[in-house]
Amino acid sequence: MKIGFIGLGNMASAIMQGIISNSVVSASDVYGYDVSDAAKEKAKENKINILGSNLDVASNSDVLILAVKPQFLSDAVKELNGKISSNTIVISIVAGRTIEALEELLGEVKIVRTMPNTPALIREAAIGYSFNGLIAEEDKAVVKKILSSFGKAIEVPERLMDAVVGVSGSAPAYVFMFIEAMADGAVAEGMPRALAYEFAAQAVMGSARLMLETGKHPGELKDMVCSPAGTTIAAVRSLEESGFRGSVMDAVIEASEVSKEL
């Protein structure tokens, strides 16, 4: 199997590193092109094949990954309509571009719409994905293998993909803001900043793993920490008074709505 990338930015680099390090394919079976010379030079660090055009990449790929910014997609694929093999699987990580929009640009081809997030850089992405009607069962297994090489891949109906953007694609930014804010609070209490970041980040990571590995409802896990008249319930009250939950909900909804407008 040969995998091609149109666009060689940070997310493409993270994905190809996952693919190569997990032996989905070897670096010699990965192809790519980007209009940016700097991106091409950086991609060479992964020892992949840099080709001369997007069409060259598409012609050499069994799986073609579209990894460009939404505003650049039309220009990037304009020469590909009618020239992609009917056997090629096209995986798009382009935010906000629906399967229907991709079909209009590319013609009648196998399409997978995905939304990964930046923890792909450490192979811990959360990836939502949806298929068009041309994807066969054997294709689905290939897609799952590729996406699982850099994170947790979850199939969802396409109507939920904008919600995936809000709750996962954009979410690392919310989490980093939360970590930074917790660390600021600890610094205000006298803790050195580097130590505060370490405590805050570990607390977030451990809490997330606890929920995923126990399968318990987050409310139940919260209640387990909240002793009567204790420190945690006092902190929870403060968060509720400042509209914490509503602010987070608004952030997810806002990101989802912007995704629909892209």
Image: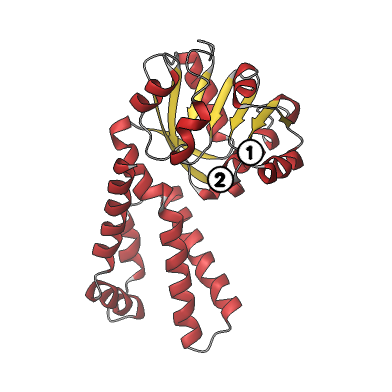
Instruction: Of the two numbered discs 1 and 2 on the same chain, state the one appearing first in sequence.
Output: 1
Task: Using the image, determine if residue 214 lies above or below residue 8.
Answer: below
Reading the image, the residue beneath label 1 is 18
Q: For the point 69% across and 27% down, which residue is it?
A: 52
Query: Contact (CB < 8 A) between labels 1 and 2?
Result: yes
Numbered circle sitting on residue 85: none
Which quarter of the figure has residue 9?
Answer: top right
The disc labelled 2 sits on which kind of residue?
Ala
Q: Please state, as top left, top right, bottom left or bottom right, where the N terminus lies in the image.
A: top right
Q: In this view, does 120 lie above or below 158?
A: below
Q: Which colour scheme is used?
A: secondary structure
Vertical arrangement, residue 254 with respect to residue 101, above or below: below
Q: Which amino acid does label 1 sit on?
A: Gly
* Residue at 47 percent of width and 34 percent of height: 73
Q: Position of residue 178 (x, y in %)?
A: 42, 67
Callout 1 environment at 10 Å: few (<14), some (14 to 19), or many (20+)? many
Which sits in the foreground, 66 or 196? 66
Q: In this view, does 165 lie to the left or right of 21?
A: left
Between 197 and 163, the one lying in front of the other is 163
Q: Where is residue 124 in the image (x, y as percent from the top left)?
A: 55, 46
Q: Is mark 1 on a helix, strand or loop?
A: helix
Task: List x then y, in percent, for residue 12.
Answer: 59, 39
Note whether residue 118 is visible.
yes
Q: Mark 2 points at which residue?
A: 120
Q: How crowded is mark 2: few (under 14 residues within 10 Å), some or many (20 or more)?
A: many
Tell me which residue sits at (57%, 22%) in the image.
63
The C terminus lies in quadrant:
top left
Picture coordinates of residue 104 (x, y %)?
37, 21
Outermost residue on the top side: it is 86
| Closest to the observer, 238 or 209 | 238
